[in-house]
Image: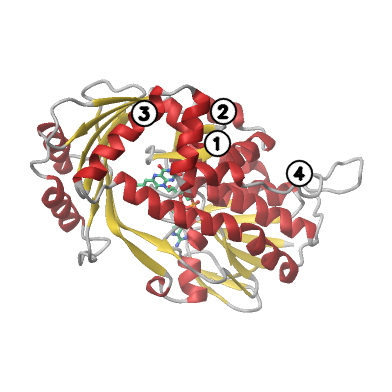
Amino acid sequence: MRILISGASVAGPVLAYWLTRYGFSVTVVERAPALRRTGGHAVDLFRPAMNISEKMGVLPRVEERATGANRMTVHREGARRPVRVDLSKIFSATSDRHVEIMRDDLSEIFYDAARDDVEYIFGDSITAISPDGEVRFENCAPRRFDLVVGADGLHSNVRRLVFGEESRFSAFVGAYLGVLTLPNASGLDGELLMHVGVGRTAGMYGARHLGDARALFLFRSERELGHHHRDVPRQKELLRGAFGGMHPEVDRWLDELDRTPAFYFDSITQLRMDTWSRGRVTLVGDAGYCPGPAVGGSTSLAVVGAYVLAGELARAGGDHERAFPAYERAMAEYVRGSRAAALSAAKTLIPTSRLGVQGLAQGARLISALPAGPSRALLRLTTRSARLHNAMTVDDYPPLPTAAGGRAGADGRELYP
Ligand SMILES: Cc1cc2nc3c(=O)[nH]c(=O)nc-3n(C[C@H](O)[C@H](O)[C@H](O)COP(=O)(O)OP(=O)(O)OC[C@H]3O[C@@H](n4cnc5c(N)ncnc54)[C@H](O)[C@@H]3O)c2cc1C
């Protein structure tokens, strides 16, 4: 049984890994010419995604590449003294298993885990999917697949082809996000510097093994600011407008906008679809249920979604009419919880009032000052995301095929021909 996955970032390679282990034959098409290795931004793996990484045997590599972020200094706009926070306490209060890692490191680790068993096509994109499974590409000749999975992110191409324009499913959460790569002039190693004001938050972090650093900008806007996603000069102008004059340090980060080799800007939107499967096609990760980049733990959601989808397909013997609804049912609560957690995280991270600015800094300080037990209890009482990730449990799916058992997969024979 042949399955095509669009997208080779996080959800795509995890899904490819598990599908090949269950004996499906997998092709991944990725628009980028090669696996991205510029670092991207830091992402979080919470307990359920850590457990899945462990089952995949990649946890030691994940932990080896962790950013090691453990300290945060918060400058409040208008206040003289910064607040220093033990970030590791906040992470461990959020989830009893957590790692922060650069997205491109994570995607390389997941890709390596099954690269020899998967056909990867880089530098191409799907242009049409017919109901009988014929798929057309920009470059490759048309091919037939039994199932197609969109793992191609928030602005998914597969979703647009099968379900329609993104605007039908996306909800603006009232904020924007910008990230730029810049020299790690202050030699940050495991430390996050933050400047928080009413309606705007800027931060900078560096990772041990990265030669450079990232500056992250989050700001509120009541309405969507007309910008085209390819109009980079306009996006940089919007960032300068929102953060200029906040603090001399933030101004220095903004100065790098003219020199940065990597820049990202987008509105923070949530995808809200009632169902993310149609016929032979389904969606996984951000493509199907992004709760909002940088605020909703969406990387863990993507890893869990990929694992569950593969598991349900294996459990249903490849019958997508049973597997897709089961996958959606299994994910529904985690998806709903992530959306709610993202809205509340956006409110906390980009305060709407001076009280909120004080609350963010003081709350973080209090949690980091308490011993582990009480800090965990306090965070769980006060934030949704702290309850969400540890509450998520994932099923154990059919045991992996073994040569002795006559079921194939990793050894090349198809389990579901
Ligand atoms: C700035 C920023 C900060 C973030 N911070 C955090 C964080 O702190 N914590 C966290 O957990 N998450 C964070 N996220 C979210 C996280 O990056 C995503 O949730 C995660 O990467 C989702 O993985 P995915 O595989 O579903 O999609 P993506 O990582 O978006 O990958 C989609 C893949 O599909 C490919 N693609 C796109 N179009 C096509 C096409 N037409 N054909 C073929 N391939 C295509 C892309 O090139 C890409 O490789 C952040 C995101 C951003 C943008």
**Pointer 3 local density, CA inside 10 Å: few below 14, some 14–19, many at least 20:** some
Q: Sequence order check: which comes first, mark 1 or mark 2? A: 2
**Image-based side of 277 in relation to 258, left or right:** right
State yes or no: discs 1 and 2 in contact (Cβ < 8 Å): yes
Depth check: give the residue in front, 277 or 149.
277
Q: Which mark is residue 109?
A: 1
**Kind of residue at disc 4:** Ala
**Kind of residue at disc 2:** Arg
State yes or no: discs 3 and 4 in contact (Cβ < 8 Å): no
What residue is at 52 percent from the left and 75 percent from the top? 162
State yes or no: discs 2 and 4 in contact (Cβ < 8 Å): no
Q: Which residue is mark 3?
A: 366
State yes or no: discs 2 and 3 in contact (Cβ < 8 Å): no
Give the spatial CA distance, label 2 vs label 3. Answer: 33 Å
| Count of all numbered marks drawn on residues in the image | 4
Depth check: give the residue in front, 59 or 92.
92
The image quadrant of residue 367 is top left
Give the spatial CA distance, label 3 vs label 4. Answer: 49 Å
x and y percentages locating residue 409 in the rendered image = 78, 48
Q: Which residue is mark 4?
A: 410
What residue is at 91 percent from the left and 44 percent from the top? 405
**Pointer 4 local density, CA inside 10 Å: few below 14, some 14–19, many at least 20:** many
Q: Quadrant of the C terminus?
A: bottom right
x and y percentages locating residue 287 in the rendered image = 49, 61
Q: Which residue is mark 2?
A: 61
